[in-house]
Every structure is written in C-alpha cells, then in structure tokens.
Image: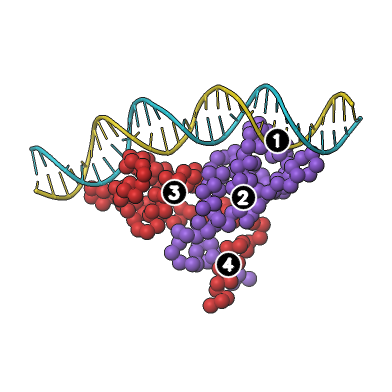
Chain colours: A purple, B red, C cyan, D yellow
Amino acid sequence: MAYAEIFTALAVPARRHIFEALRERPKTVGELAAGQPVSRPAVSQHLRVLEAAGLVNVEPQGNRRLYSIKRDGLNDLREYLESFWPDALTAHGAEVLRRMEKK
Amino acid sequence: MAYAEIFTALAVPARRHIFEALRERPKTVGELAAGQPVSRPAVSQHLRVLEAAGLVNVEPQGNRRLYSIKRDGLNDLREYLESFWPDALTAHGAEVLRRMEKK
DNA sequence: ACTTACCGTAAGCCGCGAGTTACATATTTG
DNA sequence: CAAATATGTAACTCGCGGCTTACGGTAAGT
C-alpha cells in the first residue's frame, strides 16, 4: 500500500527531478535547489514528501543535511508493477535471464 | 519520457482502482463505474487519461466500449525503475533467478 | 419509429497542493 | 560573541484537475 505514496510523490515533475538528481550522488538541499527552477523552500517540502514515501534517506551533517536515494523504497512499486503480469516470469525477468545466458 | 504520464495517471486513487479492476478481465465503462464511488462520466474521463498514458486498450463493441489492460504500457515505467540501480542485476532480477534455481 | 441503454463531451464548481515570501532555528566562521 | 550559512516551517496565493450535472450521439431492443 506504499506504492500509493510513491506514485503521488513521483507524479510531480519537480519532485522527480530532485529524485533523479540524487542518482549521481547524495546531495544537500542547497545543491539540489541550485539545479532546480524552484525556490529552496519548495525543494525542502518536496524532500519531505519523498522521505515520507520512503524514497530518500537523510543524514544530518553538522550544518547541512545530506539526502540520498533509498532504493529499497522502490520495492513496493516494483511489486505493484509485477502484479499486473499473470505469470511469475515477467518481461524484465526474461531480459535478465537473456543477459545471463549471453555471458 | 512516457513514464511521466504513467505516474500522473496512476497517482490518483480512483484511476488506480479502475486500472486494477481491469486486472480481472476486460470491462465496459458501466461495469467499471458500478464498482466505483464516482460517477460514470468521471470514469470515462479517467479512462481517457489511462488511454493517453498507454495503459489501457479500447475495443468498441457495438453499443459499448470494452477496456482492457495494455501491459506494454508499463514497460517505460519498468525501465525508469531500473535506471535507479547501477548494476544490471536488480533485486527483482535476483529474485527471478532465485526462483529458477529452486526449481 | 420510438424508446431505452451505453457512452463521450461541455461547462462549471471547488478543494488540494505546488509555489512563493517571511520568519525561526541551528551550526559554522571570523 | 556576532555574522553568515544552511535548512525547516508558517502562512498565504493561485492555478490545475477531479468531480458533478446536463446534454448529445449512436446502437440495440420492442
């Protein structure tokens, strides 16, 4: 039931951009806001939503807070995705197997 | 870039419920509206969004229109998900392999 | 042909949430 | 200790979108 919050969290472009920006490396709020067309408080609010959805981690470091991607948070979304395929072996599973066999 | 529309499509509960209701079998608009707390026109509008996102198929059958899940529409979302893992073998891929080995 | 069933579209209302500015708090720096 | 830096929170505005009612159109039934 956590996928609901994940969908609403990633539905808004600004929030997706922030989340995607964390793919490179953990960043502070200021860093994230610098690469965004919205104000810094807006980024803070978005990060709160992302954190509530279990998509990011926070690690306070003195004066600033370092945000990073929490990959486990995407598991619920993945399971939800898989629930739409009747068989256990999904397209992605087949793709992984195909790569393994090629090696 | 289609995952954006998928996120916004599945972010609203009513639309998710409609989409999930199609897991059982293809249904008409009336059938879908019957199992929903919203009006039938609302369901129609939601179906339009789902169709624009490539998540459902329509097949006009005489008087009514039969909607069904379009699984390929979820591929973009899946690829987006995978883009957050550095290595090719994701948690789900590992799970699939685990099941295969058990057999 | 008339009526009924099924569905999409138009127009309008209204609440939610994304964004801003202003302010409060805490840590670092000089 | 004072100033600057980094971040969160509060209060407010405002536009988007979800929902409803009303209507139009097409197919089926009698």
- Mark 2, chain letter? A
What's the mark number on residue A54? 2
Q: What's the residue at 26%, 48% (across, down)?
A: B64
Describe residue B102's horizontal placement relative to residue B22 as left or right. Answer: right
Q: CA distance from mark 2 to mark 1?
A: 23 Å
User: Which element type, helix, strand or loop, lies under badge 2?
Assistant: loop
Residue D6 location, quadrant:
top right
Location of mark 3 (residue):
B16
Location of mark 4 (residue):
B95
Residue A52: image x %, image y %? 61, 46
- Mark 1, chain letter? A
Location of mark 1 (residue):
A34
User: Which element type, helix, strand or loop, lies under badge 3?
Assistant: helix
Q: Residues within 10 Å of mark 2 (few under 14, many from 20)?
A: many
Q: Is residue B58 visible?
A: no
Task: Decide which of B60, A33 is in the foreground and name it.
Answer: A33
Q: CA distance from mark 2 to mark 3?
A: 20 Å
Give the label, 2 or 3, closer to the camera. Answer: 2
Tags 2 and 3 in contact by the CB under 8 Å rule? no
Q: What's the residue at 61%, 61% (across, down)?
A: B90
User: Which element type, helix, strand or loop, lies under badge 4?
Assistant: helix
* Placement of A94 over or under D5, stated as above or below: below
Describe residue C24's horizontal placement relative to residue B45 as left or right. Answer: right
Residue D18: image x %, image y %? 42, 39
* Placement of B70 over or under A64, stated as above or below: below
Q: CA distance from mark 3 to mark 4?
A: 26 Å
What's the mark number on residue B84? none
Give the label, 2 or 1, closer to the camera. Answer: 2
Question: What kind of residue is marked 1?
Answer: Ala
Question: What kind of residue is marked 4?
Answer: Glu
Task: Decide which of C28, A93 is in the foreground and name it.
Answer: C28
